[in-house]
């Protein structure tokens, strides 16, 4: 997983993010974090002794939502096919 540089202000608001090769800043607050797949950094929690990145789930794209809907429809069709094909006693 690639490290991300996050520069933030004293409230935890993210000012800038850099990926890949970057120079660590001097004199301004920053974090280096690895962002898990399917997540993004929404802010920096500055309430504790050590600032930490706050992650949240990425919103699903329209294509991902259609894939989920398609799978649900396939399951429903399979269940209906079984019901129709099963002889009623």
Image: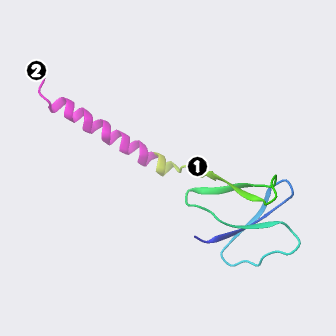
Q: Farthest residue in the front direction? A: 49
Residue at x-position 10% and y-position 20%: 89
Residue at x-position 78% and y-position 76%: 24
Mark 2 Cα within 10 Å, few/some/many (few <14, many 20+)? Answer: few
Identify the residue position indicated by label 2 in the image.
Answer: 89
SS for dot 1? loop
**Residue 33 or 71: which is nearer the viewer?**
33
Residue at x-position 13% and y-position 23%: 88
Mark 1 Cα within 10 Å, few/some/many (few <14, many 20+)? Answer: few
Say if 22 sits above or below 42 in the image.
Answer: below
Q: Which residues are magenta?
A: 66-89
Answer with the quarter of the image where residue 84 lies: top left
Q: Is 10 placed left or right of 50 in the picture?
A: right
Say if 42 sits above or below 17 in the image.
Answer: above
Is residue 88 located in the magenta-colored stretch of the structure? yes
Answer with the quarter of the image where residue 33 lies: bottom right
Q: Where residue 54 appears, x then y in whole percent? A: 70, 54
Q: Where residue 29 appears, x then y in whole percent? A: 83, 66
Q: Nearer the viewer, mark 1 or mark 2?
A: 2
Q: Which mark is residue 59?
A: 1
Answer with the quarter of the image where residue 36 lies: bottom right
Q: Main secondary structure of the magenta part?
A: helix
Residue at x-position 41% and y-position 42%: 69
**Residue 41 or 63: which is nearer the viewer?**
41
SS for dot 2? loop
């Amino acid at each position: 997983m690639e490290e991300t540089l996050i520069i933030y202000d004293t409230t935890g608001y993210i000012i800038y993010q850099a990926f890949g090769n970057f120079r660590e800043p001097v004199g301004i607050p920053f974090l280096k974090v690895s962002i898990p797949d399917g997540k993004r950094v929404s802010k920096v929690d500055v309430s504790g002794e050590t600032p930490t990145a706050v992650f949240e789930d990425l919103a699903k794209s329209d294509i991902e939502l259609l894939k989920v809907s398609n799978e649900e429809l396939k399951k429903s069709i399979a269940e209906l096919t079984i019901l129709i094909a099963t002889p009623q006693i």
